[in-house]
Amino acid sequence: MTVIAQDAPVATPIPGVAHATWAGHDDGLQQLSVWRQSVAASAATPPHRHDIDEVVLCLSGRGELHINGQVHAFHAGETLVLPRESMHQIHNSGDEPLEIVGVFGGTPVGTWLPDGSVLPLPWRT
Amino acid sequence: MTVIAQDAPVATPIPGVAHATWAGHDDGLQQLSVWRQSVAASAATPPHRHDIDEVVLCLSGRGELHINGQVHAFHAGETLVLPRESMHQIHNSGDEPLEIVGVFGGTPVGTWLPDGSVLPLPWRT
């Protein structure tokens, strides 16, 4: 498909994390994935890393990025730069849903937990 | 920088096309560039192609994507999938500015015109 509707995120098995894949390998791409996610108030992604570069666009809400042992506050209108292999975790630190777009410089997107095991993702990547 | 403000697009030498680079090689990325652009009413990008996959998120407005000899109408809330080497041109077909985010599966972003010559871009890619 050349023109694709931007689906709203839907609930996933990861508590508080809703997801929609907006573009990826199944759309004819080889170097790019685009995810849309909503993180509920007080929720967070698991700590994890990817083998490819990621950029997160914060659309609304506010959060904390935990990355490589550091903590960075962020909010709507800011962009997070997550070079590949950076261990990171995104927390919603506000009272409203944290609405983000995650962009990856590859597809599919490999994801690993801190103990080195693969995090099987419940969506197409 | 890990957290970067999302700058508003500013006018460029390309008529009707304003641009801001939100993330790319200078931010420590090797596989990803993110651009924010605004295309004025009745304006268009030049026809061009890249050597890397691109996805365009339409934030507001409406446009026409001319790609490989086909024309696709699109509007806010839709995503364009532009596999690498696709010759394409984006027109604003509405009365309001066409606001888009362009995401690339590589950095820097090589850009070529239909005659095979390089299009030198007046921004960091």
Image (tube, coloured by chain):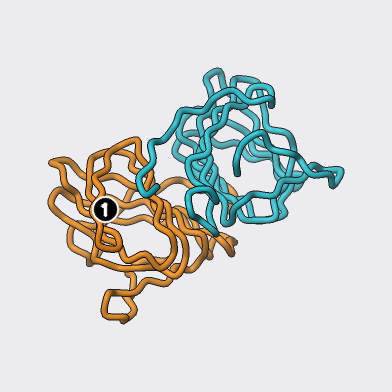
Chain colours: A cyan, B orange
Image mark count: 1
Residue A114 at x, y percent in the picture? 82, 43
Residue drawn at (76%, 40%), measured in percent from left and top? Answer: A119
Residue at x-position 46% and y-position 30% = A60
Percent x, y of residue B25: 53, 65
Residue A106: % across, % down = 59, 56
Q: Residue at x 66, y 23 (%)?
A: A43
Q: Amino acid at mark 1?
A: Leu
Q: Quadrant of the C terminus of chain A?
A: top right
Q: Is residue A88 left or right of residue A11?
A: right
- Helix, strand or loop at disc 1? strand
Picture layout, residue B69 above or below residue B96: below
> Looking at the image, which is closer to me, B66 or B103?
B66
Q: Give me the residue at 54% from left, 59% from top.
A: A31
Q: Is residue A6 left or right of residue A19?
A: left
Q: Chain of mark 1?
A: B
Asked whether B30 or B58 is in front, the reply is B58
Q: Taking A96 as reference, is B68 left or right?
A: left
Q: Identify the image quadrant of residue A117.
A: top right
The residue where tag 1 is placed is B65
Task: Please tell me which residue lies in front, B99 or A36.
Answer: A36
Q: Callout 1: 10 Å neighbours few (<14), some, many (20+)? A: many
Q: Is residue B94 above or below residue A62?
A: below
Q: Position of residue A84 (x, y in %)?
A: 67, 56
